[in-house]
Image (tube, coloured by chain):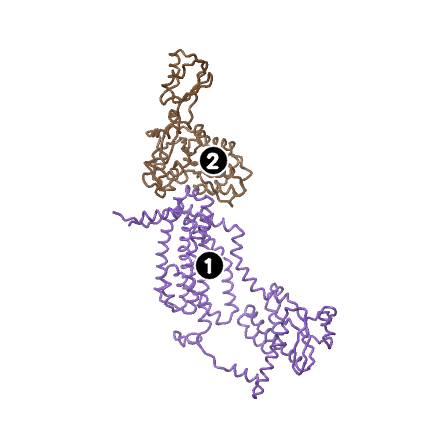
Chain colours: A brown, B purple
C-alpha cells in the first residue's frame, strides 16, 4: 500500500491480543488509505474479527497501537465509521425504520434526517414494505440487510463489514456486492472480512490475508495471485512431454492427449512453451489457467510465506 | 499491585440521552411494563373496594326462629338488632373517615350516638359524591328475621327447599334458614336447618347468644351481672405512654400519641418503597443488559457510542422507567396525604405533617438517587458478565440475598429505633439508604445522616468506576467471567 500519498484511515502497528493465554492476533500491522476496498481474508479463527474489533477500539490490544483517522482508537471517530459486526443483532421490538434511525442518530444525525434517510434507504434496497415491521418479524436475510443499512445510513467515511456475506442467499450476496461497489464509488473506504475468496476477488483492490492470528499477505490482488501455483493444460500426442517438463512442474497427470500440470513456484507458462518448442513437442492446445485467490492462500499458508 | 486511576469518563450527553430514551421507550411501550407497574396498584384498589362490592352484591338472608321453648327466640332477635346496630355504627364511622370533613366529624358522631345508624346513614349519603354513591352501598344488615311461616320442621321444609316462598314487604322471598330451639330429655337443643350450608351468620349469632347467656347465668349465681362487669372493664386502668424527650409545651404534652408514631411508619413505608424501587430498577437494568448481549445489539452500539454512554444512558433510562412505574403510587400517596389532611382525625393529620417534613423529603430524594445508582451500577455490571438469563439469575442470587438482608432494617427501625445495629447499618453502603431513612424520625444527629450520605456517595463512585470496568471487560472483551478473572489477575499482579 502507498503510505506516502493519502493519509491512513486506519493504521495498526504490531498489535497482539490473547484470550485466556491463547494468542488470537499476533503482531499484526497494516494501513488502509482513503478510498480503498480491502478484503480481509482468512479461514475461521484466523483472527479477523478480533483484529477488526481492536481496529474499532471495541477491544484493547495487549500490545501495539491503533490509529483511526490519525487518532488513537480510544478516542473513536464516532459518526465517521459504519460497522456491521459478525454477530448480527438489532432491537427485536423496534421497527426496521426506527432501528436504522436510532443507529443513525447515535452517529450524529438529527431525528428528522435520520428517519428520512431510513425511509429512503429501505426503499432503495427493496425493503420499503417492511419499514414499520418489527425486527423480530423479519427473515434473517432481511434483518441482515436492515442492519447493513443501519451501518451505512449516516454515510460513514470508513465502513467495516465483518463477514457481510454470511447467511445471505446468492441473490442478496449479489445485491450486497452492488451496495459495496456503490459506496466505494462515492470515495468511501471499506474493509470487509470474509472467508469466501471469490467476493474479495470480485470487489477488492487490496487484500490482507490472515492465518493463525498472523498476517500472511498484505498487498494488491495481482500480487496475491502471484503466490498461487500456476496450472496449465496441454493437449498433445507426444509421449515425451512428461520427461521434457519434469524440471518445471510440481505435479503432472495425463489422460490420453490431455495433460494437466501444476508449475513450480516461479515457473511461468511461457517457460513451458519455450521447452515444448525447443523439444519439438507438437501442441494442439496450450491453456494456462487463471490462478485463484484460494490457491494463493493455500500456498501461502502451507509455505509460511509472510509478506 | 496496580490499579487504574479514577477518572470521570468522557461522554456525549446527546448519545447518553439517546441510549436512555431507547431504554425508556423500549419498556414503557410494552403491556408487560404497565401490568407490572399497575398490577399491585389495582390489587390494592381491588382489595379496598372488594368489601364494598361484596356488600353490594351479597343478598339479604331471611331466616326464622322456631322456638318450641318460647324463651330464647325474641332474645336472639334482639341480639341481632344490637349487633347490627354496633356493626353499622362501626362501618359508618370508617366511611365517615374519608367522606366527612374534619370540622363536621363531631356533628356526625353526635348524630350516630344519639339517633342511631339510620339518620347517620342518611347524613353520610349526602356526603358521598353521586358518582361513588352509585358503586358504594351504605352498610346494612345482611341477616333479617321474618315470622316463622309454619310451626313444625316438617311444615317448614318446603320453604327451605324452594317449594314455597315467604312474603316480605309484599315481595316473594326464599327462606334461607330456620333455627329450631327445643327441649330433649330436659336439655335445650338448637338446630339450624338450611340448604345454604356455607352461610353461618345465624349459627354464629346463636352461639354468641348462648355463650353470653351462660356468662350472665354464671355471674348471677354469684350475685353479679354482665352490665356491671362491662362497666368495671371500661373503667380499668390503661397504661399511658410518655416520651421524656417531649416537653409539656408540645402539642398533647409529653404523652405519646399516634402523631409521634406515624413518622416511624411513614419512614418504614418510604424505606420499603425505596427497596422495591431499587430492586425493580436494578433488575430491569440487568435484564436490559443481558437482552442486548443476547440480541447482539451491544457491539453495533459500541461502534457508535462509548461504553460509558451506554452505561450511564441505561442508568438514566431505567431511572425514568422506575419513576414512571412509581407514578401511580406517587399519585396515590399524594392523594392519600391530602385526603388524610382533609378528612383524617387531628392526630393522623398532625402525624403525617410531622412525618413528611422538608428534611425527610430531601433525604428521601438523596437516598433514592444514591441507592439506585449504587445498586443499579452493580446490576449493569452483572448483566454485562452474563451470557444468558440463567447466568444472570446465578449472578443475581447473592445480590438478592444481600438486598433481602438489608430490608430487615425496616422492622428493626420500627421496633427499636435506637438500636445499635440500625446505627451501624447506616454506615454500611448496602443498607445505608434504608437504615438512614428509617432512622430519620428518631432525629439522629445531622452529621450521622450526612455521614451516611457521604459513605453512599463514595461507595457509589467506587461502584460505578468498578462496575464500568467490569462492564467494559464483560462486554468488550466478550469473555464474561473468564475475562474478568484475567483482568483481576493483571491488576493484582505485583509490580516490580
Q: Chain of mark 1?
A: B
Q: Nearer the viewer, residue A45 or B408?
A: A45
Badge 1 local density, few (<14 within 10 Å), some, or many (20+)? some
- What percent of the width, then of the height, locates residue A106? 44, 43
From the image, which quarter does the N terminus of chain A lie in?
Answer: top left
- Tell me which residue sits at (45%, 57%) in the image: B279
- What percent of the width, then of the height, locates residue A223? 37, 25
Q: Which residue is mark 1?
A: B276
Distance between mark 1 and mark 2 Cα atoms = 45 Å
From the image, which quarter does the C terminus of chain A lie in?
Answer: top left
Q: Chain of mark 2?
A: A
- What percent of the width, then of the height, locates residue A86? 44, 39
Q: Residue furthest left?
A: B496
Query: Are discs 1 and 2 located on one and the same chain?
Result: no
Q: Residue furthest bottom?
A: B223
In this rendering, the answer to whether B121 lies above or below B450 is: below
Badge 2 local density, few (<14 within 10 Å), some, or many (20+)? some
Q: Which SS class for mark 2?
A: loop
- What is the number of callouts on the image? 2
Q: Residue furthest top?
A: A280
In this rendering, the answer to whether B51 lies above or below B383 is: below
- What percent of the width, then of the height, locates residue B283? 45, 54
Snapshot quadrant of residue A189: top left
Q: Which residue is mark 2?
A: A166
In this rendering, the answer to whether B2 lies above or below A214 is: below
Amino acid at each position: 500500500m502507498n503510505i506516502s500519498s493519502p493519509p491512513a484511515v486506519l493504521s495498526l502497528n504490531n498489535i497482539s491480543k490473547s484470550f485466556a493465554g491463547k494468542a488470537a492476533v499476533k503482531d499484526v500491522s497494516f494501513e488502509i488509505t482513503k478510498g480503498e476496498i480491502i478484503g480481509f481474508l482468512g479461514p475461521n479463527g484466523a483472527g479477523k474479527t478480533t483484529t477488526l474489533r481492536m481496529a474499532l477500539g471495541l477491544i484493547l490490544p495487549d500490545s501495539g497501537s491503533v490509529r483511526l483517522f490519525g487518532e488513537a482508537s480510544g478516542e473513536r471517530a464516532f459518526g465517521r465509521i459504519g460497522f456491521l459486526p459478525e454477530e448480527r443483532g438489532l432491537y427485536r421490538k423496534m421497527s426496521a425504520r426506527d432501528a436504522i434511525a436510532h443507529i443513525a442518530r447515535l452517529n450524529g444525525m438529527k431525528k428528522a434526517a435520520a428517519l428520512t434517510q431510513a425511509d429512503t434507504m429501505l426503499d432503495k434496497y427493496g425493503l420499503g414494505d417492511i419499514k414499520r415491521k418489527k425486527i423480530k418479524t423479519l427473515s434473517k436475510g432481511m434483518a441482515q440487510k436492515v442492519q447493513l443499512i443501519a451501518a451505512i445510513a449516516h454515510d460513514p467515511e470508513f465502513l467495516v463489514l465483518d463477514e457481510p456475506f454470511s447467511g445471505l442467499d446468492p441473490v442478496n450476496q449479489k445485491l450486497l456486492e452492488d451496495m459495496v461497489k456503490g459506496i466505494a464509488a462515492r470515495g468511501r473506504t471499506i474493509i470487509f472480512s470474509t472467508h469466501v475468496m471469490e467476493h474479495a476477488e470480485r470487489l477488492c483492490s487490496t487484500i490482507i490475508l490472515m492465518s493463525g492470528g498472523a498476517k500472511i499477505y498484505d498487498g494488491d490482488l495481482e500480487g496475491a495471485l502471484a503466490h498461487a501455483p500456476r496450472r496449465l493444460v496441454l493437449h498433445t500426442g507426444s509421449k515425451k512431454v512428461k520427461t521434457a517438463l519434469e524440471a518445471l512442474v510440481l505435479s503432472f497427470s495425463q489422460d490420453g492427449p490431455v495433460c494437466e500440470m501444476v508449475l513450480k513456484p516461479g515457473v511461468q507458462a511461457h517457460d513451458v512453451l519455450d521447452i515444448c518448442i525447443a523439444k519439438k513437442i507438437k501442441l494442439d492446445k496450450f491453456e494456462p489457467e487463471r490462478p485463484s485467490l484460494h490457491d494463493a492462500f493455500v500456498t501461502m499458508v502451507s509455505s509460511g510465506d509472510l509478506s | 499491585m496496580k490499579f487504574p486511576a479514577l477518572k470521570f469518563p468522557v461522554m456525549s450527553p446527546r448519545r447518553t440521552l439517546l441510549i436512555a430514551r431507547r431504554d425508556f421507550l423500549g419498556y414503557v411501550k410494552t403491556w408487560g411494563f404497565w401490568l407490572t407497574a399497575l398490577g399491585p396498584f389495582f390489587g390494592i384498589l381491588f382489595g379496598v373496594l372488594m368489601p364494598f362490592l361484596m356488600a353490594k352484591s351479597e343478598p339479604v338472608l331471611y331466616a326464622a326462629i322456631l322456638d318450641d321453648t318460647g324463651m330464647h327466640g325474641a332474645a336472639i332477635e334482639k341480639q341481632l338488632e344490637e349487633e347490627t346496630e354496633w356493626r353499622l355504627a362501626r362501618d359508618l364511622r370508617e366511611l365517615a373517615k374519608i367522606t366527612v370533613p374534619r370540622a363536621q366529624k363531631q356533628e356526625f358522631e353526635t348524630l350516630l350516638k344519639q339517633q342511631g345508624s339510620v339518620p347517620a346513614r342518611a347524613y353520610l349519603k349526602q356526603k358521598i359524591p353521586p358518582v361513588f354513591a352509585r358503586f358504594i352501598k351504605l352498610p346494612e344488615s345482611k341477616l333479617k328475621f321474618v315470622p316463622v311461616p309454619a310451626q313444625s320442621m316438617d311444615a317448614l321444609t318446603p320453604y327451605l327447599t324452594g317449594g314455597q316462598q315467604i312474603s316480605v314487604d309484599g315481595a316473594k322471598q326464599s327462606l334461607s334458614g330456620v333455627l329450631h330451639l327445643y327441649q330433649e330429655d330436659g336439655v335445650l337443643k338448637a338446630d339450624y336447618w338450611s340448604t345454604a350450608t356455607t352461610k353461618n351468620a345465624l349459627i354464629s349469632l346463636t352461639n354468641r347468644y348462648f355463650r353470653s347467656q351462660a356468662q350472665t347465668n354464671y355471674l348471677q349465681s354469684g350475685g353479679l351481672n354482665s352490665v356491671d362487669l362491662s362497666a368495671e372493664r371500661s373503667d380499668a386502668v390503661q397504661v399511658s405512654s410518655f416520651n421524656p424527650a417531649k416537653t409539656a409545651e408540645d402539642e398533647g404534652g409529653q404523652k405519646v400519641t399516634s402523631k409521634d408514631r406515624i413518622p416511624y411508619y411513614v419512614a418504614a413505608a418510604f424505606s420499603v418503597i425505596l427497596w422495591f424501587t431499587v430492586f425493580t430498577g436494578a433488575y430491569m437494568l440487568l435484564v436490559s443488559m443481558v437482552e442486548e448481549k443476547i440480541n447482539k445489539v451491544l457491539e453495533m452500539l459500541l461502534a457508535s457510542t462509548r461504553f460509558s454512554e451506554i452505561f450511564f444512558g441505561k442508568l438514566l433510562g431505567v431511572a425514568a422507567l422506575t419513576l414512571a412505574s412509581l407514578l401511580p403510587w406517587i399519585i396515590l400517596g399524594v392523594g392519600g396525604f391530602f385526603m388524610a389532611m382533609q378528612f383524617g382525625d387531628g392526630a393522623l393529620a398532625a402525624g403525617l405533617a410531622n412525618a413528611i417534613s422538608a428534611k425527610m423529603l430531601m433525604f428521601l430524594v438523596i437516598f433514592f438517587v444514591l441507592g439506585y445508582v449504587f445498586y443499579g451500577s452493580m446490576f449493569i455490571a452483572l448483566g454485562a458478565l452474563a451470557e444468558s438469563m440463567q447466568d444472570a439469575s446465578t449472578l443475581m442470587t447473592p445480590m438478592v440475598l444481600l438486598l433481602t438482608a438489608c430490608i430487615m432494617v425496616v422492622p428493626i427501625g420500627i421496633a427499636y429505633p435506637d438500636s445499635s445495629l440500625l446505627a451501624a447499618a447506616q454506615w454500611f453502603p448496602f443498607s445505608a439508604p434504608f437504615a438512614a431513612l428509617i432512622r430519620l424520625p428518631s432525629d439522629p444527629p445531622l452529621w450521622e445522616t450526612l455521614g451516611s450520605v457521604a459513605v453512599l456517595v463514595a461507595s457509589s463512585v467506587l461502584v460505578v468506576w468498578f462496575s464500568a470496568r467490569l462492564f467494559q471487560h464483560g462486554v468488550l472483551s466478550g469473555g464474561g467471567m473468564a475475562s474478568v478473572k484475567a483482568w483481576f489477575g493483571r491488576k493484582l499482579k505485583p509490580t516490580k
